[in-house]
Amino acid sequence: VQLQASGGGLVQPGDSLRLSCAASGSSFGSYSSYSMAWFRQAPGKEREFVAVSSWSLILYTDSVKGRFTISRDNDKNTLYLQMSSLKPEDTAVYYCAAAQPKTRLTSRLYRGDEYDYWGQGTQVTVSS
């Protein structure tokens, strides 16, 4: 299974950006059954959860609610993160991740160790 993240860049505060994460691999199975998430890691900080799409469930970390929207196109095996009203504190490397389908507590979707596959990351820099 491979995850390829793209769409990062340098933008100004208040701008918008859309990240994409394309999934591929013969062992992937049914993409729609995977929980797909975005995490980010800022310089000198730990990786943090941003958002997840799991069947009909969508969750966001508080700091991005109302500004970021996670979505997925199951026909294209692609995950998106639409980011608007970007702030300097959103600067980070953004990673997409996939968790194999299984019964799990919702709270575990916030944990990086719940995810089986990771993309290589795409840099988002918000600066004037």
Image: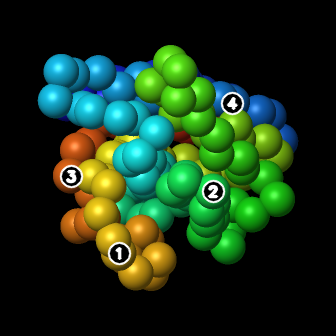
Q: Amino acid at mark 2?
A: Ser
The front one of 54 and 69 is 54
Q: CA distance from mark 1 to mark 3?
A: 14 Å
- Within the image, what quadrant is residue 112 found in? bottom left
Of tags 4 and 1, the one toward the viewer is 1
Q: Which residue is mark 2?
A: 56
Quickly name the residue at label 4.
Answer: 17
Q: CA distance from mark 2 to mark 4?
A: 24 Å
Q: Amino acid at mark 4?
A: Leu
The crowd level at tag 4 (other Cα within 10 Å; few <14, some 14-19, many 20+) is: some
Mark positioned earlier in the residue sequence (3 or 4): 4
Q: Are marks 1 and 2 in contact (CB under 8 Å)?
A: no
Dot 2: what SS? loop
- Which circle, 1 or 3, is nearer the viewer? 1
The earlier-in-sequence mark between 1 and 3 is 1
Real-space CA distance between mark 1 and mark 2, rounded to the nearest whole angstrom: 15 Å
Which secondary structure lies at badge 4?
strand
| Residue 46 location, quadrant | bottom left
Q: Which mark is residue 104?
A: 1
Label 3 to label 2, Cα distance in Å? Answer: 20 Å
Identified at 82% across, 59% down, the residue is 66
Q: Which of the two discs, 2 and 4, labels the residue nearer the N terminus? A: 4
Q: Residue visible at 27% across and 52% down?
A: 100
Residue at 40% across, 81% down = 105
Q: Is residue 67 left or right of residue 71?
A: right
Secondary structure of the residue carrying tag 3 is loop
Residue with the mark numbered 3:
116
Q: Amino acid at mark 1?
A: Arg
